[in-house]
């Protein structure tokens, strides 16, 4: 790819996804664009750049952002924060919300769905008598349309289910289909997936009790990280939790967030800073824990 086209692509990708594409990553572009060349019957990466200039909101442009997005994930990835959810955060909300009986959780970089489904399985592990009648909403969003479709399907390879998923969870919540595994309806129905870009001016997810945004801000520069965390904070209920990646210490620079003692990845809204939006739960929060 010619230098001026690569420079244009760097600016476009940053604008659309927040990803900072370094100059030494041209080899990554070359390897991932082969699918684009085949799909659109193009002969060179320069033609891809020219097509994006002409149609910056076209299907090819969306596919380019898709293939340059890193989608590394696995079930129960980062056991420390799942232990925090199981042993501290979720029990707190179960106690605080026992009258309201409503809980909203947002996986803000859901990739192919393993994180959101892991949270659903974790909630299922609580005694059904405790959560009976609760309105539980788990939302998974991601920039990649392809990943969102995979998440909705809930079908994973043998390799994918072997990465972090305990064998008892596999046998309890999945059905084998040939060489693949399909997550059962009682888990799949707990999660709603749809595409969303963290670069959007605002997020249409309603207010949430827990927001998880891990392993995506690492690709943003500091300004974009702070701006994104500000927008995430606005979607937290006044007693909500924001869970970030282990390298996202820039959250300490965001006014109104306080790091939870003893956990470098978890933040809460400061006591003296409350959300003014009291619409804690969207009208579409219809997913409920069942008694399977």
Image (cartoon, rainbow, N blue to C red):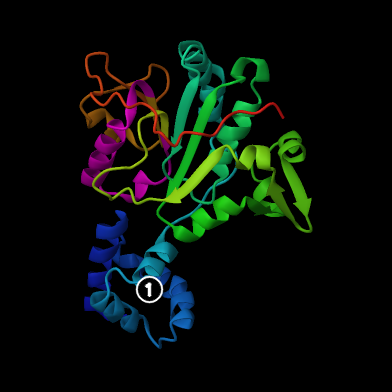
Q: How many marks?
A: 1
* Left/right of residue 77 with respect to residue 62 in the rendered view: right
Q: Position of residue 114 (x, y in %)?
A: 57, 44
* Quarter of the image with the N terminus in it: bottom left
Q: Residue at x 60, y 19 (%)?
A: 131
Q: Quadrant of residue 57?
A: bottom left
Q: Disc 1 marks which residue?
A: 60
Q: Is residue 225 magenta?
A: yes
Residue 127 in sight here: no
* Left/right of residue 205 with respect to residue 168 in the rendered view: left
* Left/right of residue 131 with respect to residue 36 in the rendered view: right
Q: Position of residue 89 (x, y in %)?
A: 48, 20
Q: Secondary structure at mark 1?
A: helix
Q: Position of residue 183 (x, y in %)?
A: 68, 45
Q: Quadrant of residue 51?
A: bottom left
Q: Is residue 132 magenta?
A: no
* Quarter of the image with the C terminus in it: top right
Q: Nearer the viewer, residue 99 or 236?
A: 99
Q: Position of residue 27 (x, y in %)?
A: 40, 71
Residue 16 in sight here: yes
The magenta segment:
212-240
Q: Residue at x 47, y 39 (%)?
A: 139
Q: Residue at x 59, y 27 (%)?
A: 123
Residue placed farthest to the bottom in the image? Answer: 43
Q: Quadrant of residue 132?
A: top right
């Amino acid at each position: 790819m010619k230098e001026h086209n690569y420079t244009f692509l760097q600016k476009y990708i940053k604008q659309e996804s927040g990803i900072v594409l370094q100059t030494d990553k041209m080899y990554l572009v070359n390897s991932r664009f082969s699918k684009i060349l085949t799909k659109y019957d193009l002969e060179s990466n320069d033609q891809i750049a020219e097509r994006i200039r002409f149609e910056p909101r076209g299907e090819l442009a969306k596919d380019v952002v898709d293939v340059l997005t890193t989608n590394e994930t696995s079930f129960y990835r980062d056991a420390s924060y799942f232990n925090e959810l199981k042993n501290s955060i979720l029990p707190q909300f179960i106690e605080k919300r026992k009258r309201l009986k409503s809980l909203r959780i947002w996986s803000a970089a859901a990739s192919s769905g393993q994180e959101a489904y892991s949270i659903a399985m974790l909630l299922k592990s609580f005694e059904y008598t405790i959560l009976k009648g609760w309105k539980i909403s788990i939302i998974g969003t991601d920039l990649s349309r392809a990943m969102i479709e995979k998440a909705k399907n809930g079908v994973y390879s043998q390799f994918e289910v072997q990465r972090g998923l305990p064998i008892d969870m596999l046998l309890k919540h999945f059905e084998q289909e040939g060489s693949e595994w399909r997550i059962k309806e009682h888990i799949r129905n707990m999660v709603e997936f749809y595409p969303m870009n963290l670069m959007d001016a605002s997020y249409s997810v309603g207010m949430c009790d827990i927001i998880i945004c891990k392993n995506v801000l690492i690709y943003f520069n500091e300004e974009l990280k702070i701006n994104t965390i500000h927008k995430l904070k606005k979607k937290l209920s006044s007693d909500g939790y924001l869970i970030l990646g282990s390298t996202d210490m820039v959250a300490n620079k965001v006014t109104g967030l306080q790091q939870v003692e003893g956990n470098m990845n978890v933040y809460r809204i400061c006591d003296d800073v409350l959300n003014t939006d009291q619409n804690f739960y969207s009208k579409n929060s219809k997913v409920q824990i069942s008694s399977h």
